[in-house]
Amino acid sequence: MFMMKQMMQYFYCNSWSWYYYWWWVVVATAVLEAGGDSSSSRNVTYDGRSLIIDGQRELLLSGSIHYPRSTPQMWPYLIGKAKEGGVDVIQTYVFWNVHEPQPGQYDFSGRNDLVKFIKEIQAQGLFACLRIGPFIESEWTYGYPTCLGLPFWLHDIPGIIYRSDNEPFKFFMQNFTTKIVNMMKSEGLYASQGGPIILSQIENEYQNIEAAFHEKGPSYVRWAARMAVGLQTGVPWIMCKQSDAPDPVINTCNGMRCGETFAGPNSPNKPSMWTENWTSFYQVFGGSPYIRSAQDIAFHVALFIAKKGSYVNYYMYHGGTNFGRSGAAYVMTSYYDQAPLDEYGLIRQPKWGHLKQLHAAIKSCSVTLLHGVHTNFSLGQLQEAHVFQDGSEGCVAFLVNNDPRKNATVQFQNASFELVPKSISILADCRDIIFNTATVKTKYNFRRTTPSQMFNSSERWEEFKDVIPSIFDTSIKSNTLLEHMNMTKDTTDYLWYTFRYLQNSNCTEPLLHIESRGHVVHTFANDMYSGSAHGSHDVKGFTFENSSILLNNDINNNISVLSVMVGLPDSGAYLESRFAGLTNVEIRCSDGFSYNLTNHDSGYQVGMLGEKLQIYNEQNLSNVDWIKATISTNQPLTWYKAIFDVVVGDELPLALNLSSMGKGEAWVNGQSIGRYWVSFHTSKGAPSQTLYHVPRSFLKPSGGGNLLVLFEEIGGDPLGISLNTISVDPPIAGPVSVPVPVPVQEEMDHHRQNLMLLMEL
């Protein structure tokens, strides 16, 4: 195998014809596939240059695909497209709160079938990187910065402090980690057993919060490393963004610019690895998409490889969908839609194709990159060269122009090279350019949505109005405001706070004043809707005020406030003690006097009636009385249902266009396709997301009689909903040789200023 790689590189990197190069690629691939034995064990180690698999250094390109964010029916296609794009490794987190929803009760079925996912990776001849955590970084509900993936039942363990040298936390963390490792071992999925898993990760970006735990932080890191290594998987362990990762655990980099920001491995005997190269960024409700160009991604990958990096993972290669209530605080249902494979798994060009060409160029010279002597030197004020020389056999050069605005003419090896702005040229034989990061040869495509079915007939809709409780309807009472998360236990987004208020005729122009550390409040006075307010991803608390609240004088008034969480908090250390929900409730009078209800008797109800009765499932529809829909956009807390058919055999992805709705959640045949929040607009006045993925596997095999159920919180118009097919138009001509435009680059730099301070610097 090593000899074949050398021969392929020799043909390509020393200017032999493309015909002979590709002939050897075909021959070598056929020989390797014919001679490979998936049952034989692999020895995975590392040195200061790379991972070493069966004695051979490997330059690996990886892509993140998360199994719960797609469906088992999609996995073969997604993994296959990643392989076609030049990816060697599929990287995924393991989602603790999905797999252990209650202590000792495990779920590895359906979208949670981790073993099936890993076996599909193996079936397609790729490696796997398993990021067990159990803390993960994936905008998955409950944790820092917007994800932890910890089951909420940990919150109620006495004396627990998450992610610290804390015995209760360590007990449950070790128990789950051991569970996953033993499951992989029992299926023979580690490379040491002949499986595809060549790397495992313990913890995740802990250094961001390590100092908050004082001496309990470093000792926790050492414990986690010892615990993981002691499980004897036979493959290396990694810790990302953890410069004090104890030997033999490898510290790795996360971010967009690891070729510039990574200080390197903490030992000369460890390779330089990049576990998260953000192809875009997660998007929140109220936020605009972050567009990262193919050129920018390629530049930073090439720079990392030029500085002796040997493993690069794209986060995400396919983002997918935050089905149900899995997204973290304010995080949209669509996840990393700007990745090389979009939310639906469709190829996004030119990103996918440009990176594929980069991968081919890098792989063609991998022997020299992994074995050659590395030198670097200046070619100008903002220009430099990185050169790998493997004796007299091979030479690879990376010519870097860091100037974002100007071309640069440089002299290298007695030749002149014109470098376009913010680009890296890869010279396979230190003479001929085989790839330039700013030269996009892949043609652009664009995504098309085509309505296939309209829901514009009121005859097909029925509705059920959920019940607004008063304090007399609640079984839980308190004279202080109770914390939202501790009450709901992450079983629902909704918590009712109810109050009784005797309105005095002397209180003129009463104003309802509410302060909340939750995400949304909907208010009702005597069952009449009084208005809503919400916070944002960047503003953790918010205030609601309404001076037109309708109160009756000299009698008790029922004030009901629905507190809503859109994912659990995105804070860091000591998450177990975080507070969400209402913090202050007052009736303010025009004369300056106020009635504070905060420390008066209040009643609580967890969740909505429709949720408890699960009326989104076909078998539970009769649990409530549905009536013909009246369709009013001023109709809060209303459930809608309709039946629809789809064309069987059409494999195009499907999405519901919910642009006419407000805020809520949608189910298809009892499966939640996620939260929608169309009414929360971006700074440009548009919804952050209007299309919501409906996987084909959620539909009935016959194609007919599918049940759509919506829970609308604030009032929307279901007559404006449509079911759309999603397709990619044939590629259209795109730029052939253009760098990232200066205005785009400046906008990206502006976004980075805040982003990198927290997450990369």
Image (cartoon, rainbow, N blue to C red):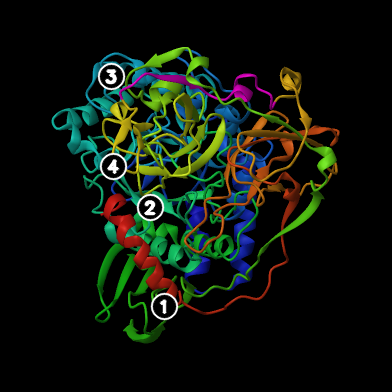
Give whichever of discs 1 and 2 has the lower sequence position.
2
Q: CA distance from mark 1 to mark 2?
A: 30 Å
The numbered disc on residue 742 is 1
Work out whether residue 177 or residue 392 is closer to the camera in this orientation and state it: 177
Give whichever of discs 3 and 1 has the lower sequence position.
3
Residue 100 seen in the current view: no
Does residue 469 appear to the left or right of 390 in the view shown? right
Q: CA distance from mark 4 to mark 2?
A: 67 Å
Q: Amino acid at mark 3?
A: Ile
Residue occupied by mark 2: 310
Q: Secondary structure at mark 2?
A: strand
Give whichever of discs 3 and 4 has the lower sequence position.
3
Residue occupied by mark 4: 592
Does residue 621 appear to the left or right of 249 in the view shown? right
Work out whether residue 442 or residue 581 is closer to the camera in this orientation and state it: 581
Give whichever of discs 4 and 2 has the lower sequence position.
2
Give neighbour class at mark 2: few <14, some 14-19, many 20+ (Cα, 10 Å).
many
**CB atoms at circles 1 and 2 under 8 Å apart?**
no
The label nearer to you, 1 versus 4, is: 4
Residue occupied by mark 3: 160
**CB atoms at circles 3 and 1 under 8 Å apart?**
no
**CB atoms at circles 1 and 4 under 8 Å apart?**
no
The label nearer to you, 3 versus 4, is: 4
